[in-house]
Amino acid sequence: MTCMYCKCTHIFYKIESILLCYTVVINFFS
């Protein structure tokens, strides 16, 4: 899953998606 996917989620899951995006980015650069 990528941040592009996060931008396409429902509003109800917006916060969770942002956190998921953040985690993915951190894991990618760690």
Image (tube, rainbow, N blue to C red):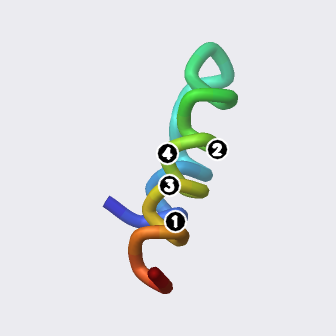
The location of residue 17, given as percent across then percent down, is: 55, 38
Q: CA distance from mark 4 to mark 1?
A: 11 Å
Q: Residues within 10 Å of mark 2 (few under 14, many from 20)?
A: some
Type of amino acid at the residue the image marks with label 1: Met
- Residue corresponding to mark 4: 20
Type of amino acid at the residue the image marks with label 4: Leu
Q: CA distance from mark 2 to mark 1?
A: 10 Å
The location of residue 12, given as percent across then percent down, is: 62, 14
Count of labels in the image: 4
Q: CA distance from mark 3 to mark 2?
A: 9 Å
The location of residue 7, given as percent across then percent down, is: 61, 52
Q: Is residue 16 above or below residue 27?
A: above
Q: Earlier in the sequence, mark 4 or mark 1?
A: 1
Q: Earlier in the sequence, mark 2 or mark 1?
A: 1
Which element type, helix, strand or loop, lies under badge 1? Answer: helix
Per the rendering, the mark at residue 23 is 3
Type of amino acid at the residue the image marks with label 2: Ile
Which element type, helix, strand or loop, lies under badge 4? Answer: helix
Query: Residue, x 50% and y 55% (percent of image)?
Result: 23
Q: Earlier in the sequence, mark 1 or mark 3?
A: 1
Q: Residues within 10 Å of mark 1 (few under 14, many from 20)?
A: few
Q: Quadrant of the C terminus?
A: bottom left
Spot the residue most to the left. Answer: 1
